[in-house]
Image: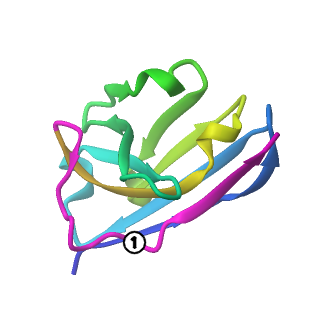
Amino acid sequence: QVQFVESGGGLVQAGGSLRLSCAASGIAFGFNTIGWYRQAPGKQREFVAIINAAGSTRYIDSVKGRFTISRDNAKNTVYLQMNSLKPEDTAVYYCNAALGGSAVYTRNWGQGTQVTVSS
């Protein structure tokens, strides 16, 4: 069964940092592009960053230069290092396999991890 488990969120002040982790199971992890997504209150879930099997990455403009996505295939885990956090980064963060930026397993979202940035 496909499963994604996110962790590492919390409450930080603006300018602070957090490192999110995403543990995936039930997929051929090393061959998959994995993405981070977020959903702020009252807004639709949006793409944040992806990393493909070769390690190439892509980000939305608003996080470029502040967020870094990485992966450890031996641990079936993807990370999102978030620096210089802003209040507008406040959201629940999710991970999923990705295809062209869109989530693949839309019926298998994890519980997400809450990130709250105070001003």
Q: Looking at the image, how many numbered discs can be counted on the residues?
A: 1
For the residue pair 107 and 57, the one nearer the viewer reads as: 107
Q: Residue at x 47, y 36 (%)?
A: 69
Q: Tell me the amino acid under the disc marked 1.
A: Gly
Residue 58 on image: x %, y %: 34, 26
Residue 117 part of the magenta segment: yes
For the residue pair 53 and 16, the one nearer the viewer reads as: 16
Determine whether 93 is above or below 65 in the image.
below
Span highlighted in magenta in the image: 100-119
Q: Secondary structure at mark 1?
A: loop
Determine whether 79 is above or below 41 in the image.
above
Residue under label 1: 110
Residue 115 part of the magenta segment: yes
Residue 1 on image: x %, y %: 21, 81
- Residue 3 shows in this picture: yes
- Quarter of the image where the C terminus is located: top right
Q: Decide whether the magenta segment is chiefly helix, strand or loop.
A: loop
